[in-house]
Image: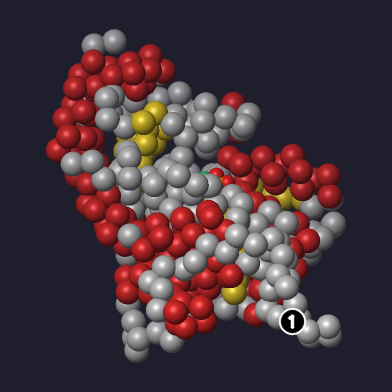
Amino acid sequence: MSFPNERLETSLILASTRGDYEQKTGAVNVPIYLSSTFHQESFDSFGPYDYSRSGNPTRDALEKTIAELEGGTRGFAFATGIASITSAFMLLSAGDHIIITEDVYGGTFRFVTEILPRFAIEHTFVDLSNLEEVKNAIKPNTKLIYIETPSNPRLGITDIASIVEIAKTNDCLTFLDNTFMTPLHQRPLELGVDMVLHSATKFLSGHSDIVAGLAVTKDEELGKRLGFIQNSFGAVLGAQDSYTLIQNIKTMGIRFEKSTEAAQKIVDYLVKHPLVEEVFYPGLPTHPGHEIHAKQSTSAGAVLSFRLPNRATTKAFVESMKIPVFAVSLGGVESILSYPTTMSHGSMPKEEREKRGITDGLLRFSVGLEHVDDLLADFEQALKIAQEV
Ligand SMILES: *Cc1c(COP(=O)(O)O)cnc(C)c1O
């Protein structure tokens, strides 16, 4: 039971301990149930759990937590973000067509272009900020519009409510990858989206310790269908990782807020730097999606991208940065500097990549929890070296 009008920051802490076990024992943390199978007391009626692929109490606590946070009916935890996304796509059938955002996460791109066609599920990539183009891409067999906002790595913004309206008019489902905003700052289900997906590896976990995925459905019936797929596909999150994620979610509010504050300062610094050609951040008034983002989200987020002139300056800059890790991923307590060309979008053909503005000078920066003045000083010295190249 939640507190009347409970705020999400409170739910982050309390949601996982609303299960039976915790209430019975008073434990403030969810126990880790390391049990693959469950004894059935009676010959002909089974208890709530039988086998951990189908359901595990620790995973259950996590699934209830994310369902509550997103305001949905059912939550599901998967082994990775991609497992949640690919499992969601398994709701489709041969002959169906998907409309998908052009600047989708690289791993989602790979699945949609390399795997789904083998099952006769076709797709059209569309710039979802162009609503006319979306309408024109609808076919009689279009069953799904797939949204990612803000998107990776250029922080493109999609008007969620407008896409939902087009989808509903045409009897399509909408799925939204909410990884960049988290349930704290973007509420897709409240805007009519059917399913929210997360790479919980990122902000929800926040410590670069586990890989995990989450999905939440608004509708009970769709939830049942996804539950069937989760069990049939079997890409579930283990009990230990479920526990880690539950714990990490508790501090997400404060982590996200602090990193976002620093991101804004770094953006203010970068836009003024002569070597930086372009800065992508939804909090910038000059960002093309700024107004739409402000309407549907309560934070500009902790991820930004920027463009340096070429590969050589980019290489010198990356090699001179001392604080961040140079790595794939985002949303950790440590700042993470990524090079989309060879990292998140390494699986995308060069031509497709460049069409999406992912050039050799583009870098993505996920702001962690180091002191912002140290991060700024690091940028200053590394850009100075890059400038001399
Ligand atoms: C990382 C990421 C994914 C994939 O999640 P994994 O946990 O790496 O499988 C999907 N979408 C977005 C936006 C991501 O950043």
Q: Which residue is drawn at 49% across and 54% down?
A: 200
Work out whether residue 201 or residue 155 is closer to the camera in this orientation and state it: 201
Q: Quadrant of residue 324?
A: top left
Number of labelled discs? 1
Give the x, y percent position of residue 157: 44, 54
Work out whether residue 172 or residue 34 is closer to the camera in this orientation and state it: 34
Q: In the shown orientation, is residue 41 left or right of residue 152?
A: right
Give the x, y percent position of residue 185: 37, 64
Q: Residue at x 33, y 45 (%)?
A: 333
| Residue 300 visible to an observer of this rendering | no
Under mark 1, the amino acid is: Glu
- 20 versus 210 height, above or below: below
- The residue tagged 1 is 41
Q: Which residue is drawn at 41% across and 68% down?
A: 29
- 304 versus 315 height, above or below: below
Give the x, y percent position of residue 188: 49, 68
Q: Quadrant of residue 170?
A: bottom right
Q: In the shown orientation, is residue 35 left or right of residue 328?
A: right
- 81 versus 319 height, above or below: below
Q: Which residue is drawn at 35% across and 59% down?
A: 252
Work out whether residue 340 or residue 231 is closer to the camera in this orientation and state it: 231
Give the x, y percent position of residue 292: 39, 61
Residue furthest out toward the bottom: 4
Q: Quadrant of the C terminus?
A: top left
Q: Quadrant of residue 270?
A: top left
Q: Which colour scheme is used?
A: secondary structure
- 382 versus 220 height, above or below: above
